[in-house]
Image (cartoon, rainbow, N blue to C red):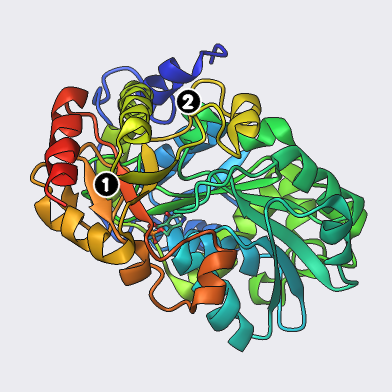
Amino acid sequence: MAQYRIDTKCIQEGYKPKNGEPRVLPIIQSTTFKYDTSEEMGKLFDLAASGYFYTRLQNPTNDCVAAKIAALEGGTAAVLTSSGQAASFFSVFNICSAGDHVISSSAIYGGTYNLFANTMKRMGIEFTFVQPDCTPEELNAAFRDNTKAVFGETIANPALAVLDIERFAKAAHEHGVPLIVDNTFPTPVNCRPFEWGADIVIHSTTKYMDGHATSVGGAIVDSGNFNWDAHADKYPGLTQPDESYHGIIYTKAFGQGGAYITKATAQLMRDLGAVPSPHNSFLLNLGLETLSLRMERHCANALETARFLQKHPKVAWVNYCGLPGNRYYELAQKYLPKGSCGVVSFGVQGGRTAAERFMKELKLAAIVTHVADVRTCVLHPANATHRQMNDEELAAAGVSPDLIRLSVGIEDVRDIIDDLSQALEAI
Ligand SMILES: Cc1ncc(COP(=O)(O)O)c(C=O)c1O
């Protein structure tokens, strides 16, 4: 296929019908696939032939959508998961076991923080959290002999800190480990972390990719750039025989560009089963078709809304990396020149109580535990997504108790601003 631009890829990549086949991605809503002989089926189980046998492992609808996301990110392979949480977990667990260590930016989604700091800790995988703005010395000091990966979010939810991807990638590579980046907020339309040195990208496709708040989902994409064999002692799961799969060696059988995703599919998906339904993947694909158009509108609306809030006397502070003077403005100009995302955070004069009153007064913007769909919505993280954190942890994640997270939709921006305006007047 010609090297199309990102807007064209959103529409044309993934499903490529042959002569006489349906124009639109079919939903193969079947758990199983029929074969004439046991031998043929056996070859599939041995990973000696490619083909479908059970949807937990592979499904044609899911695969087409994964291929589209891989193309959008510029990766070699991808797998869809049933949620963004599953994608975060699989991306790390695919290369870590009990006794291993991972460095993560502290400015990450609250659910990811909980997964890393508590659940994966119980599995024996230890995380060190570093500030996204830490000095190179602080970042270097966090590495240990058993460090297996570095993790961060391109634009952190909800702190909206922009990760210096190039700097984090360089530090990771100097220590012989990959950088995993959660690219949910900008989407590949606004940033492609592989172009800055990231090795693995994950997504909560639940957000802008789906874009209509219909389907929880996730994706993991491999750049194919990390040389697992060069660090074979660190990654035995990829470079030594997998006894649970007839002694297959993933890097030998599938190469540098295929090993990581094949292992995630053949081993983790087989055993943990966080597979999306083909119907959800169909809906995700519909979302992806309009992703570039929607991102443009989300970003334009968010910038205008942020400018309005910045000037309003009842607003104490505004955080949007597209605003000149923002702490992350320069990094955003570098990594997100087309725009960042539709999420803006701010605090109102009067702190937590005024924030709660303001939210009650909103008419168009709905209070939901979600961001990044076509409808404008709002949330108070300290009372919702981040309520498991104490004040110290909240501060490290860049979430102040008065922070209001506004996800600017693609409605007419004048209606969004009118709604905010009347709610601010009321407090
Ligand atoms: C940046 C980011 N990563 C991961 C997740 C988890 O995704 P999901 O809710 O699809 O499991 C979220 C959810 O809000 C998120 O915002």
C-alpha separation, residue under disc 2 versus residue under disc 1: 36 Å
Q: Which amino acid, mark 2?
A: Gly
The mark found on residue 28 in the picture is 1
Say if disc 2 is inside 8 Å of ligand 1: no
Q: For residue 381, say whether it is visible.
A: yes
Ligand 1 is in which quadrant of the figure?
Answer: bottom left
Residue drawn where x is 30% and y is 26% of the image: 301
Q: Which amino acid, mark 1?
A: Ile
Instruction: Give the mark count.
Output: 2
The mark found on residue 339 in the picture is 2
In the image, taking residue 309 as reference, residue 239 lies left or right, namely right
Viewer-closest of 250 and 52: 250
The picture places residue 101, in percent across and down from the top left corner, at: 76, 73
Residue drawn where x is 37% and y is 68% of the image: 382
Disc 2 to disc 1: CB gap under 8 Å: no
Image: 90 above or below 190:
below
Mark 2 secondary-structure assignment: loop
In the image, taking residue 135 as reference, residue 375 lies left or right, namely left
The picture places residue 208, in percent across and down from the top left corner, at: 35, 40
Mark 1 secondary-structure assignment: loop
- Looking at the rendered image, the disc whose residue lies closer to the viewer, 2 or 1, is 2
